[in-house]
Image (cartoon, rainbow, N blue to C red):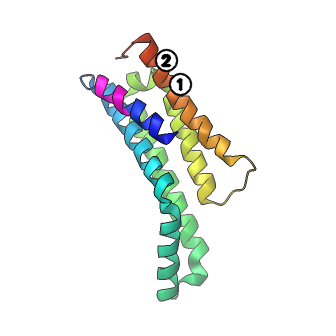
Amino acid sequence: MYIVTFISALLFTIKIRKERGNFRLWTVITSFLFLLGVNKQLDVQILLAMIWRYISYRFHLFEYRYIVYFSVILTVAIIFIILILFIFIKNRNAVVHSMLSIAGIIVLMLFVLMRANYIYIRHIHAVELAGLVMILADLLLKFKKNIIDV
């Protein structure tokens, strides 16, 4: 599902490359989808956890692992919130016309944070699929109407 959403977003981004605000917004969305797709295929979160486990044992930091772990997650969440606010402020017009995709990105990020915190919800992958479907639906509407928002 990530590959279909990524390719659709990439095609749309290429289509609107002459429109500055939209192009920047969709470049960020497409990049985010690419990174999430790579993470999904390569399971980067497990690799990072293994690296952290090795470092914590090596430097005797294992008793502080939860503090560091939640600090990293909190830092990632804060960076994401700052990035979203920056995109909103810098590209107000483009964001207004792509709210469904922005909502989809926020849902995907919530999914990533829930997985990173080991929050167990029976159908957690439904959250992931909902975010991807929101982005894909927005893209399909844009392609179908053949409207390029300014």
**Which residue, as the protein is rendered here, is positioned at the far left?**
18
Residue at 51% x, 31% y: name it: 135
Secondary structure beneath dot 2 equals: helix
- Residue 126 lies, in percent from the top left, at 67, 41
- Residue 24 lies, in percent from the top left, at 32, 33
Location of residue 53 with respect to 126 vertically, above or below:
below
Along the viewing direction, whichever of 127 and 98 lies nearer the viewer = 127
Location of residue 124 with respect to 93 vertically, above or below:
below
**Badge 1 vs badge 2, beta-carbon distance below 8 Å:** yes
Along the viewing direction, whichever of 148 and 37 lies nearer the viewer = 37
- Left/right placement of residue 69 relative to residue 31 reads right
The residue range painted magenta reads 10-15
Residue 68 occupies quadrant: bottom right
Residue at 53% x, 84% y: name it: 61
What's the residue type where badge 2 is placed?
A: Leu
Along the viewing direction, whichever of 29 and 72 lies nearer the viewer = 29
Residue at 41% x, 30% y: name it: 8
- Residue 149 lies, in percent from the top left, at 37, 16
How many residues crowd around disc 2 within 10 Å: few (fewer than 14), some, or many (20 or more)? few
Residue that carries the numbered disc 1 in the rendered image: 137
Q: Is residue 98 magenta?
A: no
What's the residue type where badge 1 is placed?
A: Ala
- Residue 93 lies, in percent from the top left, at 39, 21
Residue that carries the numbered disc 2 in the rendered image: 141
